Image (cartoon, coloured by chain):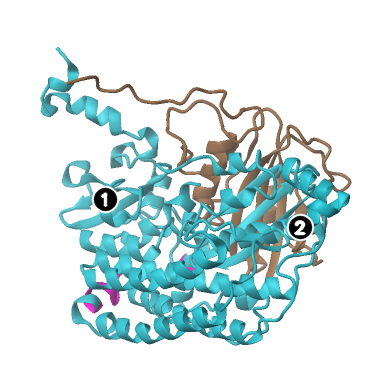
Amino acid sequence: MNDSNVRVTDRLERLTVETSEGAQGLMSRSETSVDELGRELGAVLRANDLTLDPKDVDVERRDDETMVINMGPAHPSTHGVLRLMLELDGEFVLRSKPIIGYLHTGMEKTAEVLTYAQGGTNVTRMDYLSPIANELGYSMAIEKLLGLDVPPRATWIRMMMAELNRVASHLVWLATNGMDLGATSMMIYGFRERELILAFFEKTAGLRMNLNYVRPGGVAADLPDGWEDDVTVICDTVHERTFEYDELLTGQPIFRNRMVGVAPITAEEALALGVTGPILRSTGVPWDLRRATPYLFYDRVDFDVIVGTYGDNFDRYSIRLNEIRESIRIVRQCVTNMPRGDYRSQDPKVTPPPRARIDESMEALIHHFKLFTEGFHVPAGEVYSAVESPRGELGCYLVSDGGATPYRLHVRAPSFVNLQAVPLLMRGGSFSDAITVISSVDPIMGEVDR
Amino acid sequence: MISLPPKAPPGVVTSDALACDLACFPTRERYRDLIGALREDDFEMCVDLCAVDYLAFPHRALPEGVVATRFEVVVNLLSLSKVQRVRVRVQAGDESPRVDSLFDLYPGTEAMEREAFDLFGVLFDGHPDLTRILMPEEWEGHPLRKDYAVGRVPVQFKSSPGPR
């Protein structure tokens, strides 16, 4: 008899084996060490004296009183393939553990066989909602190793695109967060506005997502004709509509009840867990790499770092909403200040020559050939370069052995680290709040798993 | 370049680093003490922890007094109050790389150490839950090692259920 004809109830054991993650999963209490139990309970530290005591496990329950259930990896509110195992007491979450790796495609390994110029197509697919931030971190790491200067126009273009991308990313967050809470109209509006930005990306870079637009030495293409008008329309429209979102969500009682005071985190906890981005800022820590360690020309533009007070879901929501407005402020200043000039470095060892030059110059032909077969060499060394992605500090640790491919490329993905706050945030909350926690942490699984 | 905090263990080699305020090269024994001293010296956040396999690049530039090993664990610390970054590079060993876990200093290194274990096989003493994180639990080998070639291992699919 074929196995698949057997009724599912007879194959329970087999089903468990097929879906089990083994020791990676959330084990029952009796099988969990005290240290690990403490971690899963979110007892990473006690806020007052900042001493870590993982053995401080204050919820005492027996195994038969609780239930371990599985959420995801295909749950609609897990934004991709995040799998959570939750230990529930009735409706309340006692322990939780994110299980990741379902989207692991070995991108860091792939990066070791791609040349520096090709690598952009790889890193851009990590955080697929903010590809520009990935490319920026990667390109800046290479430029630091090369000691390469980027022309001012390229820097302004990078900054403008990065901020537009931040707006697009936060819009998707607003949209999906609305959908998770049942505000389905927000879902439609968020994606509608994001479409404007993606259309501009398509006009500029040729692609809507995974642009590979920021490249070592500059950007891939100059801005298209009439870009000022396009960008101004985007700024005006999105800025005006953020106030519509205010009307739709900010004051709405159902939305507020699910967000205000739910899943708070303190600054000490956030720092200890390495959490960055809007989650850290929601606790009142004004840490934004754009302000603290300015890269590009962020020291030449005027913008505010939005901070919260309580570290709850609502603060994280308002920070993201207001960051859209701040980003639009930056984009407007980019439009005003955009200089004329080169959009990429003219160093022939890094930048391919213009197509027309290849026909008339032997040197250009050689450079073109070398760049697209072997690629350019980067001096041996190692560098860590960090940018502020919409989700936090996106770091790129690059080791070069002097060859044409990275010896090791490690991407410090903000979502990967932020996800560690999930057990802490979920602890003690109800199951329905767990959905808002995942949403407000905003993990992008492509970046978590890489 | 900044100097080490006064409480740091003696004999830690330091050097300049690109886009970073200080690079430290402690031995495995002094690694945890050094991080602990830096933690007390207002380095509030462990931003990043990753491993590097230097199998194919053994003669890398290291300051004098550092004995290069195949595996290296790289920790990037950040001080928000002083706006400084410190990189700690510890030589983790050749055959069976093993260092102390930073979990009780920085709980945020939990997932990063699991990742380094999963992809490089670096063991972390004192980690509460050192399991694989990105690869399946039954996976053999550590994929980011340099002797783990791309495409050498057949893709591990679970058997298909067969026709109905």
Which residue is the site of mark 2? A356
**Residue A267 covered by magenta stretch:** yes
Task: Report the chain shown in cyan.
Answer: A
Q: Residue at x 25, y 31 (%)?
A: A16
- Report in which chain the residue with disc 2 lies: A
Front one among A96 and A372: A372
The magenta segment: A256-269
* Residue A346, horizontal then vertical, whole percent: 80, 63
Residue A312 visible in the shown view: no
Q: Which mark is residue A75?
A: 1
Q: Residue at x 66, y 76 (%)?
A: A156
Q: Is residue A51 left or right of residue A63?
A: right
- Three-letter code for the amino acid on which mark 1 is drawn: His
* Residue A149, horizontal then vertical, whole percent: 79, 67
Sequence-first disc among 1 and 2? 1
- Three-letter code for the amino acid on which mark 2 is drawn: Ala
Residue B136 visible in the shown view: yes
Which residue appears farthest toward the top when viewing the image? A1
Which callout, 1 or 2, points to the residue nearer the camera? Answer: 2
- Report in which chain the residue with disc 1 lies: A
